[in-house]
């Protein structure tokens, strides 16, 4: 890791790579994940899934299953008349269990609850379901073709939690949502161009593999519902549960124990409503623990078909960009309306473009539902856009680094009107990547290099709260609603609280992700936690400190003067720490002060997005022209994070994100047949990178204090994924002369492109 | 989830065979379980009794017999072969092959007997052993028999072994003077995408005999006699093999290739040609060293 710092020195322990707080528990197996938990009286659920990708359910018979000893309940939609079946924070189009129709292979049809998991599994085989198969569409082209089967006959309710302001537009029954991004005179921009590059790019349906599959426990008691779940956004899940079961928010408690990775796959609601419905009918606490194969069927990332054209002046300056993005969204909306919104924004790149005309439509198909995936609509478009930057550079005879330097916006410059000005120095980031790749010296023969850059409007909505409680011994409990999903938030947020309260780290403890006991946070996504939750903690700490100052004046200085000091106050030259103030004010041994931190769309959070997340990646590759295998010889990431609160954690985020991007660039794709069968819904055939696939790596952290967050920090963790596919494709182009339009760049795709490059090459000795 | 089953742990092959007879159709041999348990978990097969072969002394161990042939017990794991100095000496190509089977967890658990008996068409050892002229020793209710590996694989997941028979050992003849055996594969995920094995013998300055096998390309691993014929008679000089290799590649391109997630039939044919070149060169250099 290389750190390039121009920011002011922050207080300890900010900027220190303290060990992660959950590290020892996780590596020793002491950490308890949802699947490790049980509730007295708990029963187990298993799910019967549709073998058909699209069918009407004509009958369901569960009598034989119910007759099996140990079976407690067999539940289908027909048994849930008192429940609102359809959920979804954007479009409530997703029945928690199939309701008359199945729309993808693997959709839950019947849930069995039994005394133990083996009995529940055995009972599945005793359920008989009759289906009338319906025509199937698995690609966006097929779904939009004339006469295509319609997936959703019913108009779904639009929900306020969709994450953007405008109403969801739908111009075709199979369009789940559509978004546009337009400015400038696009026709004039193209008409006056010296060069127009135009092409089609395809981005795969991918799976955000997390080690822990989806797991939930639902427990109805005292007129309310408690759910333990491996989810990223407990408060969003709470909203959906409250709506499905007609409960006030205060009657639903969602608790998130240790989580084994998310990467977007655990954002929003997944199996929680189903688990709660099963618990309701079984009248028992119920655990539903999916396998990885079932998790693959539960959500995945949006595949994309992108048609894009970019217009340039002769000196390489962008004049305009047109794009039409079609997302393969699968059977239900999930979070794709927001992914589509972001894809339309993010395909513009971090460039100054006078005119833009982008449409992104998310299309329903009979495949598993797509939702958030690290990078979130960015990599689909960045692959296309950044490929075109290199194409233009080549055709105009400009160095690919130089063409980017000419086009990136400057610090403070807005990418589109009303947007927050760029809070990063993109030109400097490009130069750091170039330096790490030794851009100025020619690559070895057979190798190619590329540098790609992206900017994502990140941070989601700035809605978060925190309570910071200073106890009578001066130690601190901080409550936040954001989830530790492996990214290290439990460490970083504690570092921020310790710094703000002048306390050693071991005096600070965190309570996270419990909708009743912790405080509200909208979501753990969009790379927002360090920045937004960090600010809420800072506000809570300041509130606590100002109360403590008041209390000291009152209880220790008899209304006289107190001087703020490190970790407490000075009264007549004597230092009193926080605990002493609390004890004095309550005039006893106990008590505590409660500091409140609220973050909303006001003040520094008025301009959207809350911050820009930069992805800046360099790659050097070679290609085995006989087998078509690409070898990544070096990968460079520049993490432009303003201030790395914990540099080692930032580095692991960047390395992890880039490797995840590399997985998609090289091998990851869920393959559906046109008939709707998923061919590789398991980890043996869906190839996720392994430790041995990690290429030589240079991770650079650029810390210029230019973020809106505490100490100039801003978010990271996704950016490094976004440009990877483009960087690999552009580097392959420079190594071999082929241009790749479809990710992943499998050996066969590379081989076919090589064959096109030189026809008749076959048969050499 | 795996349906409940009984686990038998016999102490000898004859006890194992008696246990199998008692359990009837409902029993299966169980070695590393890396395939068997997966198949049971997926509900594709159900057995009331699994008979564990790992503890049978007759199936353990790697040795060289009186004829100089290499004998590998049916329950020897991939990892044991990979680390065996005997195999390293007698058949170095197999050590290299085993080191790249699956991943270390599967290698540590999975056995060579399980690999061959399961007869998944994407098998590394099956392809190499075909070229090496190996045979397998079986022992079942009807007694013991030997089968050449060429002909052992009938269809994907089907072999000439009857369900009651145990694969006791794999026997690989000693390399003749001037003989080289090599294996090359293209691998993009867990299992090979295509692989080619070549055994050839040089005498003087010519290749006098060659056997070529290809795996993961057709529905079962097969020998390609025409490719062997193309190489036989060629000069024992890696730089002078252009025409025979092209003819060999053409012969492989005639095969009924089956596309899968690793690539289309076309791409597999192309890869087979590429691998034939590298495997032939590797076999040739081993042969020259042994001449
Ligand atoms: C993730 C993964 C990756 C893999 N990658 C590769 C690869 O790259 N290359 C490759 O070649 N293979 C690969 N394999 C296959 C692997 O080699 C086999 O799974 C393993 O060798 C099987 O051995 P086992 O002892 O576990 O067999 P088991 O699962 O115990 O048995 C498999 C079958 O053989 C029968 N059987 C086992 N032993 C005997 C015996 N001695 N006599 C009679 N019948 C017997 C069983 O009844 C069962 O039907 C992979 C497997 C996995 C799971």
Image: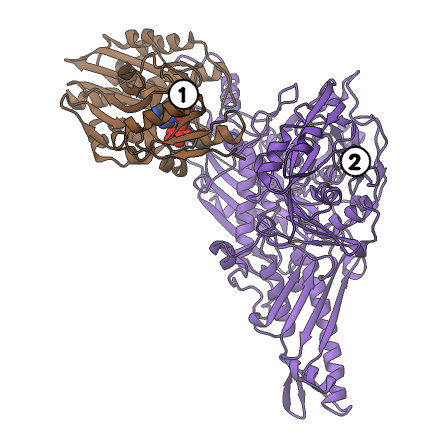
Chain colours: A purple, B brown
Q: Residue at x 24, y 21 (%)?
A: B172
- Ligand 1 quadrant assignment: top left
Q: Are marks 2 and 1 on the same chain?
A: no
Q: Give the residue pinned by disc 1.
A: B119
Q: How far across and down, in percent of the image, does residue A310 sit?
A: 70, 31
Q: Position of B176 compared to B280: left or right?
A: left
Numbered disc 2: secondary structure: helix
Q: How far across and down, in percent of the image, does residue A189 sit?
A: 77, 32
**Circle number at residue A79:** 2
Q: Does the image show residue A672?
A: yes
Q: Does the image show residue A433?
A: no
Q: Position of A520 compared to A41: left or right?
A: right
Q: How far across and down, in percent of the image, does residue A568 sit?
A: 65, 81
Instruction: Confirm if mark 1 falls within 8 A of ligand 1.
Output: no
Q: Chain of mark 1?
A: B
Q: CA distance from mark 2 to mark 1?
A: 46 Å
**Circle number at residue A325:** none
**Up/down of A488 relative to A596, above or below:** above
**Up/down of A276 relative to A714, above or below:** above
Q: Residue at x 74, y 35 (%)?
A: A97
Neighbour class for label 1 at 10 Å: few (<14), some, many (≥20)? many
Q: Nearer the viewer, residue B245 or A158?
A: A158
Instruction: Confirm if mark 2 falls within 8 A of ligand 1.
Output: no
Q: In the rendered image, which quarter contains the C terminus of chain A?
A: top left
Q: Nearer the viewer, residue A525 or B245?
A: A525
Q: Position of A327 compared to A417: left or right?
A: left
Q: Residue at x 29, y 14 (%)?
A: B147
Label 2 with label 1: CB-CB less than 8 Å: no
**Up/down of A404 relative to A670, above or below:** below
Q: Chain of mark 2?
A: A
Numbered disc 1: secondary structure: loop
Q: How far across and down, in percent of the image, does residue A274 sit?
A: 72, 40
């Amino acid at each position: 890791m290389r750190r390039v710092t121009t920011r002011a020195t922050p207080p300890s322990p900010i900027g220190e790579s303290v060990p992660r707080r959950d590290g020892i528990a996780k590596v020793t197996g002491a950490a308890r994940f949802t699947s490790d938990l049980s509730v007295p009286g708990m029963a187990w659920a298993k799910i019967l899934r549709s073998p058909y990708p699209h069918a009407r359910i004509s009958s369901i018979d569960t009598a034989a299953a119910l007759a099996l000893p140990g079976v407690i309940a067999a539940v289908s939609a027909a048994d849930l008349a008192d429940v609102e079946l359809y959920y979804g924070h954007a479009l409530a189009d997703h029945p928690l269990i199939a309701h008359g129709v199945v729309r993808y292979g693997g959709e839950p049809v019947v849930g069995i609850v039994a005394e133990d998991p083996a009995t529940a599994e055995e009972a599945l085989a005793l359920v008989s379901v009759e289906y009338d198969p319906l025509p199937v569409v698995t690609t966006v082209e097929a779904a939009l073709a004339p006469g295509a089967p319609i997936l959703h006959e019913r108009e779904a309710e639009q929900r306020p939690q969709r994450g953007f302001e405008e109403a969801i537009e739908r111009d075709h029954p199979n369009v789940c949502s559509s978004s546009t991004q337009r400015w400038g005179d696009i026709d004039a921009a193209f008409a006056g161009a010296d060069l127009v590059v135009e092409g089609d790019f395809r981005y795969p349906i991918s799976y955000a593999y997390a080690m822990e599959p989806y797991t939930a426990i639902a427990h109805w008691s005292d007129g309310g519902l408690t759910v333990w779940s491996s989810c990223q956004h407990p408060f969003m899940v709470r909203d959906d549960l409250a709506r499905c079961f007609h409960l006030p928010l205060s009657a639903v408690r969602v608790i998130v124990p240790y989580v084994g990775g998310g990467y977007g796959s655990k954002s929003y609601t997944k199996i929680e409503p189903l688990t709660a419905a099963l618990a309701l009918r079984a009248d028992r606490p119920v655990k539903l623990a999916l396998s990885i194969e079932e998790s693959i069927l539960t959500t995945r990332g949006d595949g994309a078909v992108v048609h894009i054209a970019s217009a340039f002046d002769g000196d390489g300056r962008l004049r305009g960009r047109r794009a039409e993005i079609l997302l393969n969204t699968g059977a239900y909306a999930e979070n794709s309306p927001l992914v589509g919104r972001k894809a339309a924004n993010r395909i513009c790149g971090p460039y100054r473009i006078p005119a833009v005309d982008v449409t992104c439509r998310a299309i329903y198909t009979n495949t598993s539902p797509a939702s958030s995936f690290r990078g979130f609509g960015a990599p689909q478009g960045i692959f296309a856009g950044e490929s075109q930057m290199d194409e233009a550079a080549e055709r105009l005879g400009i160095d690919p680094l130089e063409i980017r330097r000419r086009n990136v916006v400057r610090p403070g410059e807005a990418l589109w009107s009303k947007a927050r000005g760029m809070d990063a120095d993109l030109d400097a980031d490009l130069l750091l990547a170039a330096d790490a790749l030794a851009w100025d010296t020619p690559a070895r023969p057979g190798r190619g290099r590329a540098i790609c850059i992206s900017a994502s409007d990140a941070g989601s909505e700035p809605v978060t709260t925190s309570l910071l409680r200073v106890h009578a011994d001066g130690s601190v409990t901080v409550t936040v609603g954001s989830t530790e999903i492996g990214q290290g938030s439990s460490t970083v947020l504690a570092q921020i609280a310790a710094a703000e309260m002048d306390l050693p780290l071991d005096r600070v403890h965190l309570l996270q992700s419990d909708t009743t006991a912790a405080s509200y946070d909208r979501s753990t996504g969009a790379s927002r936690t360090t920045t937004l939750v960090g600010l809420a903690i800072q506000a809570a700490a300041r509130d606590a400190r100002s109360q403590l100052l008041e209390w000291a004046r009152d209880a220790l200085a008899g209304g006289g003067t107190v001087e703020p000091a490190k970790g407490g106050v000075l009264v007549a030259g004597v230092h009193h720490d926080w605990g002493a103030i609390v004890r004095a004010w309550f005039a006893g041994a106990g008590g505590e002060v409660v500091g409140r931190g609220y973050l909303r769309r006001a003040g520094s959070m008025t301009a959207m997005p809350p911050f820009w997340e930069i992805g800046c990646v360099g790659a050097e590759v070679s290609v085995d022209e006989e087998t078509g295998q690409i070898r990544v010889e070096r990968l460079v990431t520049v993490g432009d994070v303003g201030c790395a609160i914990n540099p080692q954690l930032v580095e692991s985020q960047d390395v992890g994100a880039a490797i995840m991007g590399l997985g998609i660039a090289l091998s990851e794709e869920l393959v559906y047949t046109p008939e709707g069968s998923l061919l590789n819904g398991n980890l043996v055939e869906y190839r996720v990178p392994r430790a041995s696939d990690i290429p030589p790596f240079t991770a650079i952290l650029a810390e210029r204090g230019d973020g809106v967050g505490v100490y100039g920090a801003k978010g990271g963790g996704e950016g490094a994924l976004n440009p990877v596919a483009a960087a690999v494709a552009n580097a392959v182009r420079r190594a071999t002369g082929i241009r790749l339009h479809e990710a992943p760049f499998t050996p066969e795709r590379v081989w076919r492109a090589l064959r096109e490059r030189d026809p008749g090459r076959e048969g050499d000795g | 989830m795996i349906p409940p089953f009984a686990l038998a742990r016999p102490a000898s092959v004859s006890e194992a065979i008696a246990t199998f007879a008692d359990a009837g159709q409902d029993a299966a041999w169980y070695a590393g379980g890396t395939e068997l348990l997966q198949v049971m978990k997926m509900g594709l097969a159900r057995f009331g009794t699994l008979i564990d072969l790992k503890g049978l002394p007759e199936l353990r161990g790697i040795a060289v017999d009186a004829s100089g042939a290499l004998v590998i017990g049916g329950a020897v794991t991939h990892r044991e072969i990979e680390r065996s100095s005997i195999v390293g000496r007698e058949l170095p190509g197999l050590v290299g092959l085993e080191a790249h089977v699956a991943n270390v967890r599967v290698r540590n658990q999975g056995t060579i007997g399980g690999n061959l008996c399961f007869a998944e068409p994407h098998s590394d050892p099956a392809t190499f052993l075909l070229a090496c002229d190996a045979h397998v020793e079986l022992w079942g209710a009807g007694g013991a028999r030997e089968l050449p590996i060429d002909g052992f694989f009938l269809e994907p997941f089907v072999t000439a072994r009857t369900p009651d028979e145990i694969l006791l050992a794999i026997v690989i003849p000693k390399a003749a003077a001037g003989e080289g055996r090599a294996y090359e594969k293209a691998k993009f995920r867990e299992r090979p995408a295509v692989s080619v094995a070549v055994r050839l013998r040089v005498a003087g300055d010519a290749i006098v005999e060659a056997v070529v096998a290809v795996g993961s390309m057709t529905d079962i691993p097969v020998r390609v006699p025409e490719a062997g014929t193309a190489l036989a008679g060629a000069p024992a000089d890696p730089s002078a093999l252009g025409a025979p290799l092209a003819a060999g590649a053409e012969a492989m391109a005639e095969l009924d290739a089956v596309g899968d997630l690793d690539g289309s039939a076309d791409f597999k044919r192309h890869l087979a040609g590429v691998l034939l070149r590298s495997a032939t060169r590797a076999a040739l250099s081993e042969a020259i060293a042994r001449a």
